[in-house]
Amino acid sequence: MASPIVLSSIGNVDGKVAFVGSGTVDGNANVSVSVFWIPGDNLWVLAFDGQPYYQNSCNTANPWGTGNNSCLWTPVSGFSCTGAGALAINVSGVVPVSFISFTAAIKNKTIVLNWKTASENNNKGFDIQRSQDGFNWNTIGFVNGSINAASEKTYQFSDFNPLSGKAIYRLRQVDLDGNFTYSSIATVQLLQSDFYSLTRNVSNNRYQLNLAATSQKVELSLLDAGGKKLMFKQGAMGAETIDLSKFAAGIYILQIRKGNELFIEKLFNY
């Protein structure tokens, strides 16, 4: 970009605010630049004339600035970014809560949510929200915040009546004045067969796969979006870590075969 480009809000698109502006990009004048949310992929994208060049997967009410190290913007895999300069998306205002982590894990058929904050400003607390499709959310609980805090705080919430199948969790952080922001999302898979559960650690792009004991043959395969097999393992059992941090950003497919049954999970590396 020849100079900073100011983006203006155009209202909500697909349920979240969107921003549009124009400027000189890679020597081309009047290039349209936009930042918007893609709900189907749970992604914020920065696009030049419609082509996304950067993305991040933090499910928040507004896109993050690049100064937030817990919610990084990364180049879209397979496309060249214009110029060699670093991406900078600047935002204004005081961040009410700085999240360090947010995770979900299955323990004895209970979903346990854990999160940490680095600092809090006028933080009333956290609505615990749950969804099966990433679009429709229900509040299932509330945890009080620390109001104001300059040191690390740790929180926990247990969902004793989890959904069968895929469940997506997020935190709706609420200020004392009623304003709110969202955390990143955490996904778990609780099957009626109790065969496996899958959780994601967003901070390091690692998935934890927990397999129940079975007398049937179990095979794991990891494929990229083009169908190339990146990993294959026979006889998998217990806890298995799927580490995507060594691969390029993008979407990957995990195939779990138990005897004649095949389970398919979409994994995100952002």
Image (cartoon, helix red, strand yellow):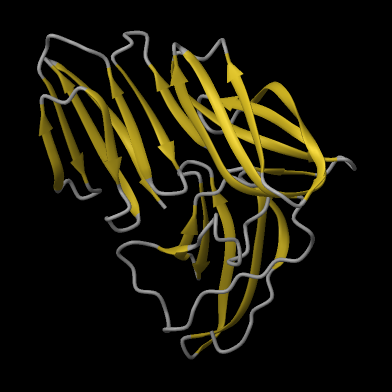
Give the residue furthest to the right.
177
The residue drawn where x is 57% and y is 11% is 160
Count of numbered marks: 0
Picture coordinates of residue 65 (x, y %)?
62, 64
The quadrant where residue 263 appears: top left
Apparent side of residue 247 relative to residue 81 in the rendered image (left or right): left
The residue drawn where x is 39% and y is 62% is 76
Picture coordinates of residue 49 (x, y %)?
50, 70
Give the answer, above or below, for where 148 lies relative to 77: above
Picture coordinates of residue 61 (x, y %)?
68, 47
Give the answer, above or below, for where 2 lies relative to 50: below
The quadrant where residue 235 appears: top left
Apparent side of residue 149 relative to residue 105 in the rendered image (left or right): right
Residue 96 makes an appearance in the image: yes
Residue 124 makes an appearance in the image: no
Give the answer, above or below, for where 9 lies relative to 184: below
Apparent side of residue 222 relative to residue 182 in the rendered image (left or right): left
The residue drawn where x is 45% and y is 17% is 107
Given residues 42 and 181, the one toward you in this image is 181
Given residues 26 and 152, the one toward you in this image is 152
The residue drawn where x is 26% and y is 39% is 253
Picture coordinates of residue 42 (x, y %)?
50, 44
Give the residue furthest to the front.
151
Given residues 170 and 49, the one toward you in this image is 170
